[in-house]
Amino acid sequence: MKKFNAPWFEETYVLKVKNWINEVLQEEDNLSLLGDISEVKKTDFSLVLLVPVNTGNLYFKATRSSTHHEAAVSRYFHTMYPGKSTGIVRIQETEGWLLMKELGGVPIRQLKDKEIWKAAITEYARLQVSEISNIDGLSGMNVPNRTLSTLKKDIIQHLEGMCDTGLSAEEKDAVMKLHPELLAMCDELEQLVPVHSIDHGDLHSANIQYVNGKIVFLDWGDSSITHPFFSTRVFWNSLYELVDNDPEWLKVIDEFRPFYLKPWTAFAPMEQLERALKISDQLGCVHRAVSWYSYLNPSVADQSEYKKPSQWLQALLEEREFAKTR
């Protein structure tokens, strides 16, 4: 039987949440509860509840301690970039709670429209550029600081441990042989585009909504301060939803690269940016493996199903093979 240790599997926690929601609604002059608060999703990582009110549906979300910063980050983006992130009614930073407005619209994965997807990745890059000057502010929201120097330390300390979450002996040997090259790639990426900004951390096509003709980014729980190009790694994976096979996938990634890179041309020539992004295609896999190994998996009681670090290292090996064909 699967084990759970998240607090929302206890009835007393859910009661505490519902009491808080009711208190918030009482303090909001224009909001009143219209029905029962019901469960939408409950996993190791989050609890989501539906809150029906007179103006439409609200959603409550609770997150694990490793992703509590999602509440503050979501409120910040709601305030700083109106219409580009989830509408926030109230947050409770200590608990990592959010009470949000229903977005409407649809995830871009349902649209299969390349032009909308291209607009999304360009707009996301612009947001990252805007946040370069706000590193201190993001740190103040407890967004994890995972710069390239931190990634180098993670590679030194945890690469073998990440391999042991599910790689075969042959795969582990291949990854461990990359150890010095991965460290050198961190240094080269830092030299090519020496900036850090917000990384969404899980920028797949369900976390990007198309709402009334606008692009909306949501679910910032995996976000960190790191090299911004790492965000593209998950987005590239989502591009597979637009094609049927690996050759087409690689082709569509190349088609999308300029749309992400254009907002960065103030920082380096396009040729230099392209080289940096190709390095990021590989290092981004390692960055994501570390996300699971050091930030997400440790909070889960039952580790038997969580082989994500090794899966991302397999993606690294696959990316290196793909790179040979380009």
Image (cartoon, grey):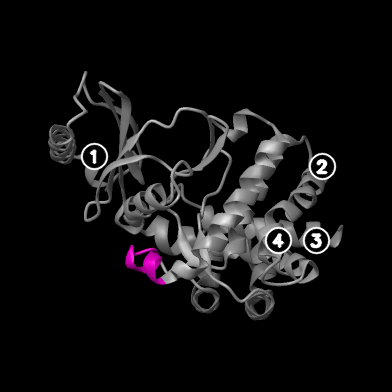
User: SS at mark 2?
Assistant: helix
Query: Can residue 157 be seen in the rendering of this structure?
Result: yes
Q: Are marks 3 and 1 in contact (CB under 8 Å)?
A: no
Mostly what secondary structure, the magenta segment?
Answer: helix
267 left or right, relative to 274: left
Mark number, residue 248: 2
Q: Is residue 137 magenta?
A: yes
The residue sitting at 22% across, 51% down in the picture is 95
Earlier along the polypeptide chain: callout 2 or callout 1?
A: 1
Task: Return the residue at label 4.
Answer: 317
Give the Cα separation between the discs numbered 4 and 2: 19 Å
Magenta residues (range): 136-143
Outermost residue toward the top in this view: 35
63 left or right, relative to 170: left
Task: Return the residue at label 1.
Answer: 9
**Coordinates of residue 299 in the picture (x, y in percent):** 34, 56
Earlier along the polypeptide chain: callout 1 or callout 4?
A: 1
Q: Is residue 265 above or below residue 218?
A: below
Three-letter amino acid code at the position of disc 1:
Phe
Give the Cα separation between the discs numbered 2 and 1: 43 Å
Task: Return the residue at label 3.
Answer: 323
Earlier along the polypeptide chain: callout 2 or callout 3?
A: 2
